[in-house]
Amino acid sequence: MRSLTLVFLAVSLPSITSFVPHGVPNVKSSVKRTPFPALSAIVDEVTTEMKVAMKAKDTATLSTIRLIRSAFANAAIDLKAEKLTDDQAQTALRKMAKMRQESIDMYSKGGADDRADAERTELAVIERWLPQLADEDQTREWVREAIEEAGADNVGKVMGALMKAHKAQLDGKLAQKVVKEELAK
């Protein structure tokens, strides 16, 4: 008897009548879902490379590309974005590269050369989609310009000006080292 009452209420209430049970054919969802939310030129290129690696049965490259795609998806979720821009994709790749570089250093210091080699292989795959960073001479030139522009002896202000102008082209650790050297003069 209760189930009849509930059915009657569901039919008679306008807010409940819009409910459609799962499994009903020809019901379209109003929420658009994509299998992979981040689409940019870099993401498209990574996807294409994944297909090539699958066909070539290159497991090392394939596993790294899957990690990259996962990082892109996580970045899109963190940024609450449907699509990643190339800059956002490069930021995710830089983060991955930095983690790999730190792992290589730690494994090398710890004597785990096999693990360091595996990380180097992953780093080489990740660096395919990253622009080349400035060398120390170019960084030093930019640091001098930032010091003149900021006109300060504060490392933070100089780094802020430097990163504002050349963030995508700089290695942060190298830049900080050069800034400290230049300010010590």
Image (cartoon, rainbow, N blue to C red):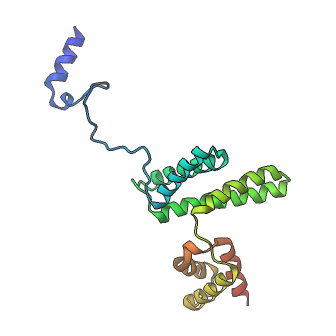
**Going by the image, does 106 lie left or right of 84?**
right
- Point out the residue furthest to the top here: 1
**Is 23 placed above or below 160 here?**
above
Give the number of marks. 0
Tell me where residue 139 appears, x and y as whole percent.
65, 81
Residue drawn at x 27%, y 41% is 30
Quarter of the picture holding the N terminus: top left
Q: Quadrant of residue 101?
A: bottom right
Query: Residue 51 versus residue 70: which sits nearer the camera?
Result: 51
Residue drawn at x 46%, y 53% is 76
**Is 148 placed above or below 71 here?**
below
Does the rendering let one see residue 150? yes
Quarter of the picture holding the C terminus: bottom right
**Is 1 placed above or below 68 here?**
above
- Point out the residue furthest to the front here: 56
Tell me where residue 88 appears, x and y as whole percent.
49, 62
**Is 77 placed above or below 11 here?**
below
Does the rendering let one see residue 94? no
**Going by the image, does 27 lie left or right of 60?**
left
Query: Residue 176 versus residue 134: which sits nearer the camera?
Result: 134
Tell me where residue 61 appears, x and y as whole percent.
64, 50
Residue drawn at x 80%, y 50% is 114
Residue drawn at x 77%, y 60% is 105
Q: Quadrant of residue 97?
A: bottom right
Tell me where residue 21 appears, x and y as whole percent.
28, 25
